[in-house]
Image: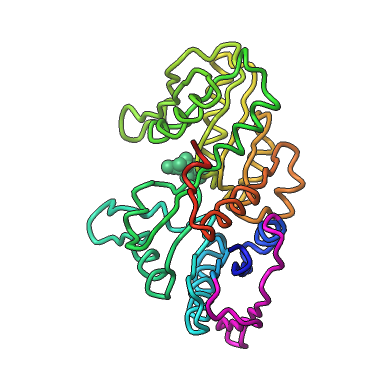
Amino acid sequence: MKSSIKIVAGNASRPLAEAIAAYLEKPLALCLVRRFADMEIFVELQENVRGEDVFIVQSTSFPANDHLMELLIMIDAARRSSARRITAVVPYFGYARQDRRTSGRTPISAKLVANLITEAGADRVMTLDLHAGQIQGFFDIPTDNLFAAPVMVRDIKERLDPVDRMVVSPDVGGVVRARALAKRIDAPLAIVDKRRERPGESEVMNIIGEVEGRSCILVDDIVDSGGTLVNAAEALLAQGAKDVYAYITHGVLSGGAVSRIAASKLKELVITDSIQPTAAVKLARNIRVATIAPLLGEAIGRTADESSVSSLFA
Ligand code: R5P
């Protein structure tokens, strides 16, 4: 069955797509993506995909709009080339943080992006650690939201002493995610509770849980500016934590985030390659990248074989 898989790489995720293709023992499908002089994107699939099960791997990471447009055009190219089925594999789903109206006269951009991907011609979506699981419901096509947890759990078990490790959610909103990881490694859970007591006063970080002498593992879906992470690490160390690690799926790492993290007291930040790491990330003294290529490769193979994907996470 796997013989009919075609893996197509977008520019946001080429090394990851190569690693996925290697896992599946398939070559990447030949696909030309280039720009016209006015920066319009042009895509040409350079091999036959008629009747094939096509997986287009493209995170909508920085520059988000270019990578999103490229994904849409690649889907359109595959649809017009008579692919049997098209799966948009979007390891990092940009715009996910705009999943609700936060005030009047604002958009729900995550829903708009879901509509665009569907309208372009995707039959399925495969993504990873969606910022909010409910975004799956923004699609009316099958959507697999995979979890990087098995990769994180393996890494944590290999490196951190089970005796004193403790999982910490960096904010109240992340408790469900952190609790799930704590359960998998059989560790206790603490929570950083950020509060602004009065308008104009700075935020106070309260720690719920006894972290003294513990190796704390901060767990989150996204590290963007690094502010949440660095502040949480400081608060934990101030409460007597032995050291602080972080396992975060998507290394958005905008602006000065890499230097902020390198200058922080964080012992190590582990991210995945859902977003292609920059040279600065690769050189940072305390950032390490764990690959999710085998996990995605396995999920793609199982999708092609019509076998269970959820059992990967049981
Ligand atoms: C928020 O809800 C997310 O889960 C992350 O905590 C947030 O996006 C991290 O952002 P930053 O690194 O800019 O503090």
Q: Nearer the viewer, residue 57 or 267?
A: 57
Q: Is residue 38 above or below residue 1?
A: below
* x and y, in percent, of residue 12 in the image: 61, 64
Q: Is residue 236 above or below residue 201?
A: above
Q: Is residue 261 above or below residue 61?
A: above
Q: Residue furthest left?
A: 104
Q: Nearer the viewer, residue 61 or 295?
A: 295
Residue occupying the point 56% across, 18% down: 238
Predominant SS of the magenta segment? loop
Residue occupying the point 70% across, 48% down: 281
Q: How is the image coloured?
A: rainbow
The quadrant of the rendering that contains the N terminus is bottom right
The magenta stretch is: 23-52
| Number of numbered discs | 0
Determine the image quadrant of residue 234: top right
* x and y, in percent, of residue 133 in the image: 38, 46
Q: Nearer the viewer, residue 80 or 264?
A: 80
Determine the image quadrant of residue 215: top right
Residue occupying the point 66% across, 45% down: 258
* x and y, in percent, of residue 52 in the image: 55, 74
* x and y, in percent, of residue 116 in the image: 39, 71
Q: Residue furthest front?
A: 1
Q: Nearer the viewer, residue 280 or 86?
A: 86
Q: Is residue 280 left or right of residue 193?
A: right
Asked if residue 221 is among those painted magenta in the image, a careful observer would answer no
Determine the image quadrant of residue 121: bottom left
